[in-house]
Structure formats: structure tokens, C-alpha cells
Amino acid sequence: MTLDTRCPVCNRLDEDGRHCFLKCKFVKYYWSDPQMEQVRQKLLDKRSAWEVVKEVLYLNEDDHLKAVILLWKWWIIGREA
């Protein structure tokens, strides 16, 4: 069985969740647009998806909502690409 591990947005090989939501050159634009780059940098330091989720949940209310909406919208964009 062959799995296609290319990023659905930028076609980078060996895409993973970290790349898809935090490192892809296109998603970086969305993080920087609402001044969320600092949050993205914090999330990049996490070692697991669970640590990322916990960090998002503990953000202040405004950043929490922005991050959740950004990640959800990016998930939809990636699925449509």
C-alpha cells in the first residue's frame, strides 16, 4: 500500500501535522496575518499533538479563539486543495 504524504497545499514530500498546520509556507501567512506568529512559535516548540492542543486551550480567550478558527479554516483549505 502506497501512501501519498505530500502536503495537499504546497506538495512538499513527507508532510506531517507539524508541517501542515505550523510550517507550510502558505500556513505561515495565515499565522502572521492576525499577529499570531508568536503563538505559532510556541506551538512549534511542542513535541506532540497533545501538547499543542493543551497550549491552544491555555491561551488567553482572544488568542484561543483565533488559533482554533485558524486551524479549523486551514484544515478545510487543505482538504479542498
Image: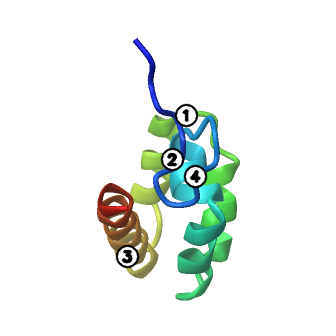
Q: Are marks 3 and 1 in contact (CB under 8 Å)?
A: no
Residue position marked by numbered label 4 in the rendering: 11
Please determine whether, in this image, residue 65 is positioned above or below residue 4. below
Amino acid type, residue under disc 4 in the picture: Asn
Identify the residue at horizontal 62%, vertical 82% (top origin): 32
Amino acid type, residue under disc 2 in the picture: Val
Residue 54 picture location, percent across and down = 44, 47
Of circles 3 and 4, which is in front? 4
Residue position marked by numbered label 2 in the rendering: 52
Please determine whether, in this image, residue 32 is positioned above or below residue 51. below
Task: Work out whether mark 3 precedes mark 4 in sequence or the reverse, and give the earlier one.
Answer: 4
Residue position marked by numbered label 3 in the rendering: 61
Residue 65 picture location, percent across and down = 34, 74
Amino acid type, residue under disc 1 in the picture: Ser
Element on which disc 2 rests: helix
Residue position marked by numbered label 1 in the rendering: 48
Q: How far is disc 2 from disc 4 in space, using C-alphas? A: 24 Å
Q: Are marks 2 and 1 in contact (CB under 8 Å)?
A: yes
Amino acid type, residue under disc 3 in the picture: Glu
The reply, left or right, for residue 29 in relation to residue 71 is right
